[in-house]
Amino acid sequence: MVILMSGIKKDKKMSSRDSILKAVKNNKPELLPLPEIDLDVFNEDINLLETFIKSVELVGGRAKVLNSISDLDNEIKALYPNAKQIVSSVKESDFGTVSISKDTDPHSLETIDLAIIQGEFGVAENGAVWISENDFSIRVLPFITNDLILVISKDAICLHLHDAYKLISKRERTFGLFVAGPSKTADIEQCLVIGAHGAVSLTVMVV
Amino acid sequence: MKVGLFIPCYINQLYPQVGVATLELLEKLGVEVDYPMGQTCCGQPLGNSGYEEDSKGACQLFVENFKAYDYIVGPSGSCVYHVKKHFDILEQTDAVKKVRNNTYELCQFIYKVLGRTDIGASFPFKVGIHKSCHGLRGLRLGSCSERMDDPYSTEESLLKEVKSLELKTLNRADECCGFGGTFSVFEEAISVKMGKDRIQDHIDSDVEVITGADHSCLMHLEGLINRNNQPLKVMHIAEILNSTM
Amino acid sequence: MAHAKEAEIFNRDESKVNWHDKALWFVRNKRDKAGSNVKGWEELRNLASAIKANVLSNLDNYLVQFEENAKKNGVHVHWAANAEEHNKIVHSILSKHKVEKVVKSKSMLTEECHLNPYLEANGIEVVDTDLGERIVQLAKEPPSHIVLPAIHKTKEEVDVLFQEHLNTKPSNGDPQYLTSEARKHLREKFLKADAAITGVNFAVADTGGVVVCTNEGNADMGTHLAKVHIACMGMEKIIPQEKHLGVFLRLLARSATGQLITTYSSHFNKPAPGTEMHIVIVDNGRTKQLSRDDFRASLHCIRCGACMNTCPIYRRSGGHSYKTTIPGPIGSILSPGIDLKKNSSLPFASTLCGSCSDVCPVKINIHEQLYQWRQIITKEVKQPVVKKSVLKITGRVLANSKMYGFMGKSARFMLKHMPRFMIYSKLNAWGKARELPKVKDGNFDEWYKKRQKNE
């Protein structure tokens, strides 16, 4: 029964923290090396924009390529003619009707129809866009809004997540995320349904 | 090259024709084959049931029987895998190491060691391969559907050269048949269901003869086919490769 | 044989078995497609496995580093030796904030610790917000799969359940309608929750941050609306550096559901102004598993569920047949480490086909560990007398050529000459649905001897 008994024996005086760490130290194997990530294995010479657009569609979103940032508002108007409560954190868009600040109660965003948020970059392999708290001041915004538009520059698309983590390695770390498509679920009999708890649609504007 | 013929216990007792085909096939290929009398079993049924300790005598006997040969060849992927993988319970003497290194599944031996694919066989039937798990994922007789390696298959390479044979593609390339040794009796319900599903896949794929490199899986499938009177035949791959129909 | 019995019951409804099998095989196929589109997939698995092996070999230092960095970010870090302590810690945080309503996103750890009943007994409402988890919560069942908690339920069953609990209209199981009703129902819960509990997919030692992945957005809806966020994690969730997320996030969703990535991969580093963030690091048997050379690698698991989707037994017996928090192949190597006796049938609920090991994104040698657990179980857990003695005698026979020759002959004789009703009796599980092999006149030994004589 030796094998079953070699776990942690909790010393009454010791905190759980210390007893856990002590047990780990006693039970862990000899140090194994941390491998290097060789990017040559994963790099591919592909068209980043095309791949990104295909990936966005695969994850249930839609991508629109704009020739100029000045087309942004017209494009949004065409897509969401009925949106009334709109938050925009993209400075080139005058479409916002609701202004928010760090002091806004997140619960009050429940009625937002559309959020337009500046994304930092896209990832070709999976259609994800990185956005960080600095881009939308209230964390719940990209989730609670009914529809979501992310705007990125067409020069800001990287190949895969390895490159993506290089791009965000120097950020101020508060809260940030990769968003890939609209919120979705397949929890009822594996049937994909778009629109679970978060935004029911996602459009990526590539400028 | 001196080859020791390893005929697993259940083949020896229940499917002697598979042993015969294996021997004849090897001789046809110009191999000098010797069948050491007194061989019993590799110990797999015990090991897989959790009684590895009690199999040490059988394993040791296996080593004694085969240690003199350059190669040990047997028509059963799972038994060969057991020798190579699980004889680690024995003290690793030179003899044990030699036996573990030089034991080959029949198709693997023909393809890899002899470097042959065309054996001059002919077999005018529609054939489906059952890729037994221990051969596939243990011995890596072929690429499995889970891994993203370049596709290859030892059994297919050999069967493709058999004249008039039509190889069929299955819906599920390499799903387990549910035999699993004592699993087949201790988890009878699932074992039977898995076997039925495998057979249905072959029927749906217009197969006339199911073959494979492991007769234990085939025994299970054959048992179901015979009980349910299904229009399929089951043959070991050695029988097909040894055939000149 | 506990699992075998449950599996036999599940198999009484063959059409349901077929349905369950197909649903999961569909996911497995999607996974294959997603993986095949990644250049260097196998190398990615090698990396993930090697990183996890490094983590386990240096876990204490990484944990301390993680704690330090998390604290610098203003996050409260707690340590729990076991489930009971974990539940107490969570409850004490909630009490401090006078929390009455909690929303919780998916966390297998809190399932393992049975947090929900504990909090409910203390008068706190806990609502599981992942749709699948909410379904099983309403049905008062445990999840049957770690990624697809309600995979065992048909849409018609969900329809009836929602009619009863959410006052929905009968819809013949329209997933679109049922999901939209669940969205409304849970939106209310999010808006009223005082605290949010989440699991942790990855905890990054060198930043002190945690990453939570969901498709539905439920973890984020909860955490960003409530004042308090409690993230509960098993201690093996640590990875050394943030760049390693690149490896794991590429593997996770593809392995789990065949998606390129989950919809949301949220990186929590600092609490939002005016809110509190807590992380509870839990051992609950993990240090024990760490001590076992043969089973340590089970702690590589990133809870993708791919081994369940691929397992031909899981697909045909359902997650509930395992009677453990984590079912399927990975559960069958983790659970014996927690309670050997209770879970002693699980390592035998496998043909050792090895599909689980080859599908696993972190390359856990699951089927080899199942084999190893079997060796331990036959020694340490009382075995059925018949099985034990038969196999022990077999061992002796197989070690002796003469005895084997005699036994082989007599077995064949019996098979050939005994009346059918005796062979196909209740005692013969093989013969219930299968014919036994037709016995030939001689065995190979005899044929070979004859041939030698004639030569």
Image: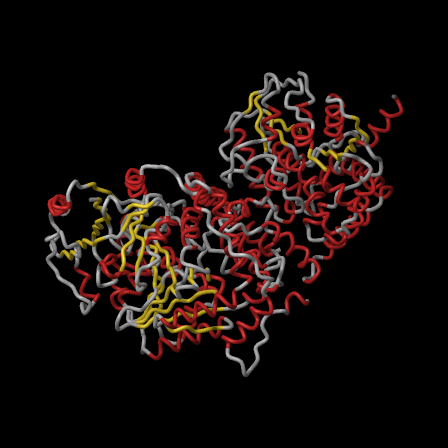
C132 relative to B140 in the view: left or right:
left
**Exactly how many numbered labels are in the figure?**
0
| Outermost residue toward the right in this view | C453
Residue C394 spot, x, y in % from top left: 78, 48
- Quadrant where the N terminus of chain B is found in the figure: top right
Pick the front one: B208 or B168:
B168
Residue displayed at 30% across by 47% down: C174
Residue A175 spot, x, y in % from top left: 30, 62
Depicted C82 relative to depicted C439: above or below = below
Residue A43 appears in the rendering: yes
A88 relative to B87 in the view: left or right:
left
Residue B235 spot, x, y in % from top left: 65, 28
Residue C29 appears in the rendering: no
Pick the front one: A100 or C407:
A100
Depicted B200 relative to depicted C116: above or below = above
Depicted B84 relative to depicted A112: above or below = above
Pick the front one: A207 or B38:
A207
- Quadrant where the C terminus of chain B is found in the figure: top right
Depicted C116 relative to depicted B97: above or below = below
Residue B180 spot, x, y in % from top left: 63, 44
